[in-house]
Amino acid sequence: MKIQEVVFLNTDEIAFKDRELDTSNLAPNQILLATEYSVVSAGTELAIWRGVESWAPLPNVPGYGAVGIVQKVGSAVKRCAPGDRIFCYGKHASFSILDERMIVRVPSELEPRHAVLARMGQVAYTSVRVSGVELGDTVAVTGLGLVGNLAAQLMKLAGCTVIGFDLSERRLAIARACGIDHAINSRDQNLEQVVRKITGGSLCNAAVEATGVPAMISAAASVVEKGTVVVLGTPRGEFTANATELLRDVHHAHRQVALKGGHEWCVPPYPEPYLKHSLARNVQQLLGFMQSGRLKIAEVISHCVPPTECREVYTQLRNRNEAYFGVVFDWKSIA
């Protein structure tokens, strides 16, 4: 069958191309999915387009989160049937063949273009899982882009007071609309002083570094005492801060800052015996938070556009156009 997909041809060119996909002989555990929506992960996908991710050489079909309708299943598939709507780790393509293990059913009451944001929520959720935060803790989030915003929302759902920092007034306004307790413009600010003023003299119990800028790890550590800094955004570029100051925050008894990686794959992809958490369980919970309205999703979707506009979307994201915040490709619009 003929399918359409977004392709990064090289570091300058993006195409929306047709190709043939053989769907005649699915493996026993495979599913054929018709994509309804796929979500853009700006940081990772722009890095792929720049050619700096060795695991994703160009040309490359980007994307790793989609929602769609099951068309056909292999002989051993038991968790879904044709006609079911599912969330999956799918690419920007009109049809995909998937492994049954990495799927989660989408509740019928939940808007599918909202459900696809569970993919970015999955990335953000790791910060809660690895930070060890407790009810009543204070948490700082540096960077209130899509992942940082969702991390801040999830920390608040976990019972924490959240202090979010960003340089963009637009992102700060979105954070406030999502109910973040304190959304602060960090330009020319001493973050430690800001935090102490908000808390009445204390520092944070944890911080989430969501920008991916290596120097911001030091900024996040500066507002934590006897707690954890979660490196949530993948660090890219050079570390330009004072490494000794960061290490002293880690070392000194009165600070005791711990650094932890926040990569989502620190938990298994699907439930395993004797383990509480999995990626699939995280997604199920995220969908539940969305359905109940506790996780704000409509507020973070800035664009829901046909995938034929992919070149414009990625160009605007690369140019740091702040109007492009959360972008979803609508595959139904070209069906």
Image (cartoon, rainbow, N blue to C red):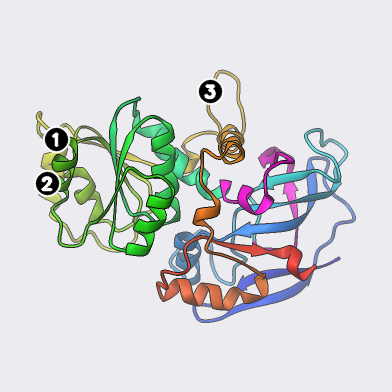
How packed mark 1 is, by other alpha carbons closer than 10 Å (few <14, some 14-19, many 20 or more), is: few
Label 1 residue SS: loop
Q: Indicate the amino acid at tag 1.
A: Gly
Q: Position of residue 149 (x, y in %)?
A: 41, 50
Q: Position of residue 269 (x, y in %)?
A: 58, 37
Residue bounds of the magenta highlight: 92-118
Which disc is residue 193 wearing?
2
- Vertical side of 242 occupied by 49: above or below: below
Task: Tell which circle, 1 or 2, labels the residue nearer the N-terminal end.
Answer: 2
- Vertical side of 124 occupied by 145: above or below: below
Q: Indicate the amino acid at tag 3.
A: Lys
Q: Residue at x 64, y 78 (%)?
A: 15
- Residue annotated with mark 1: 200
Distance Cα–Cα, label 1 vs label 3: 37 Å
Label 2 residue SS: helix
94 magenta-colored:
yes
- Vertical side of 245 occupied by 274: above or below: above
